[in-house]
Amino acid sequence: MFGVLIVLLSFFQHFILPEYTAENTSSLILQSNIEHPFEEGDEIAAINSYGNVCGVVIWKGKNTAMNIFGSDQFAPEGFGYLYDEPMLFLWYDSSEDRELEIVFEYSDAQNYLRTVNTYQPYSIFLVNKITVLDNGLDSEDEEHYIFDVHSSYPNPFEQRLVIPITVPTSGNVSVYVYDIRGRLVTERNVDVSSGYNTIELRFPDLASGKYFLNLEYLGETKGITAIKIH
């Protein structure tokens, strides 16, 4: 059986792993000798596009490894990372009681190390640089998020495209899709909540090719490029 059902005693104070985890894991190694913002008792979590925790570790002031779980054929929908899904990491600053998004860069010192921030099973990610983004979220203050668009997946896509975004307040996001000649081919309006969201779009009638997507939120526009295949 590829999946295992485990019952966890929840000693994590903030991020909680789901009861179901898959066996196709990867390892993320955090080293204490690189510059980092963590203090003992802080938590670092890997979050998938559904907003579910796929790995969590408590920082203890020394080198540590986080197991990151992928999905499998037995997993309920939304559990674990899909193959090649971009990974989002959050740091829980226990002294300030807030979440902050962090970005990792990875070492290529050995050819077996993975350096791309997308999930693949049985990989090793060795962190050599940590960047803290300034769109953190206090427990009692939801205005610290900024409008940001993360890497879409899968890309190229066949019919379904997922675009992770963060927004400071609940509202509406307009998505405008243009072809390579700059012609508007379709548009969508999506309601979003404050914080992290995933916009799932389906384009069964679009022809194969490159498309440019503009996402507009409260007068601000951010663009991405996606490739449609059959």
Image (cartoon, rainbow, N blue to C red):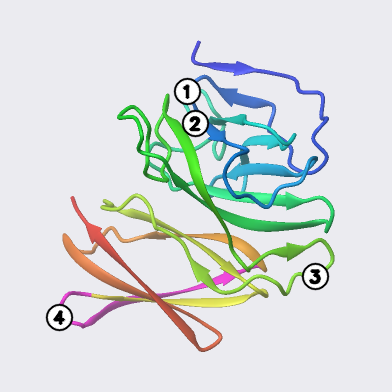
The residue at 49%/15% (across/down) is: 2
Q: Tell me if residue 195 comes above or below residue 26 in the rendering.
A: below
Mark 2 — residue?
A: 70
Instruction: Name the chief secondary structure element in magenta.
Output: strand
Distance CA(mark 3)–CA(mark 2): 32 Å
Where residue 184 sits: x, y (%)?
26, 81
Distance CA(mark 1)–CA(mark 2): 6 Å
Distance CA(mark 4)–CA(mark 2): 38 Å
Q: Residues within 10 Å of mark 4 (few under 14, many from 20)?
A: few
| Residue 186 counted in the magenta span | yes
Distance CA(mark 4)–CA(mark 3): 43 Å
- Kindly identify the amino acid type of the residue bearing the numbered disc 1: Asn
Where residue 221 sits: x, y (%)?
44, 82
For mark 4, give the secondary structure: loop
Q: Residues within 10 Å of mark 3 (few under 14, many from 20)?
A: few
For mark 3, give the secondary structure: loop
| Residue 26 counted in the magenta span | no
Q: Report the magenta residues as a range.
A: 179-193
Which-is-in-front pick, marks 1 and 4?
A: 1
Which-is-in-front pick, marks 4 and 2?
A: 2
